[in-house]
Image (spheres, grey):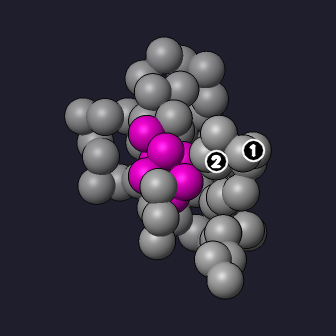
Amino acid sequence: MGEGTKVCVEITLMAADAGLIPVDKDIVAIAGTGRGADTALRIKPANTARFFDLKIKEILAKPCNF
């Protein structure tokens, strides 16, 4: 899936742990590389302790390597 997907999941977990996003509503997480944002996911967040409750609902954008 790529590095951006991993980063989207990580930032969602960190934001949920910090209480910055609700865990009962879907969010859009955006990540990318040094060249800019290239991955966007719709995610049902979860706290790190409940990692397996996190669900990737939709891939909105992902890199296309030609």
Indicate the quadrant where residue 22 lies. top right
Q: Residue 43's spot in the image, x, y percent? A: 58, 56
In this rendering, the answer to whether 13 lies above or below 45 is above
Q: Does residue 10 appear left or right of residue 51 in this picture?
A: right
Q: Nearer the viewer, residue 52 or 35?
A: 35
In this rendering, the answer to whether 4 lies above or below 56 is above
Q: Amino acid at mark 1?
A: Gly
Q: Nearer the viewer, residue 48 or 64?
A: 64
Cβ–Cβ under 8 Å for marks 2 and 1: yes
Q: Does residue 9 appear left or right of residue 43 in this picture?
A: left
Q: Residue 54's spot in the image, x, y percent? A: 41, 53
Picture mark count: 2
Query: In percent of the image, x 31 and y 34: which residue is there?
Result: 48
Residue located beneath label 2 in the image: 32
Q: Residue furthest top?
A: 18
Q: Nearer the viewer, residue 43 or 59?
A: 59
Whether 6 is among the magenta residues is: yes
Which segment did they paint magenta? 4-10
Tell me the element at label 1. strand
Query: In percent of the image, x 64 and y 48: which residue is there?
Result: 32
Give the prevailing secondary structure in the magenta stretch.
helix
Residue located beneath label 1 in the image: 36
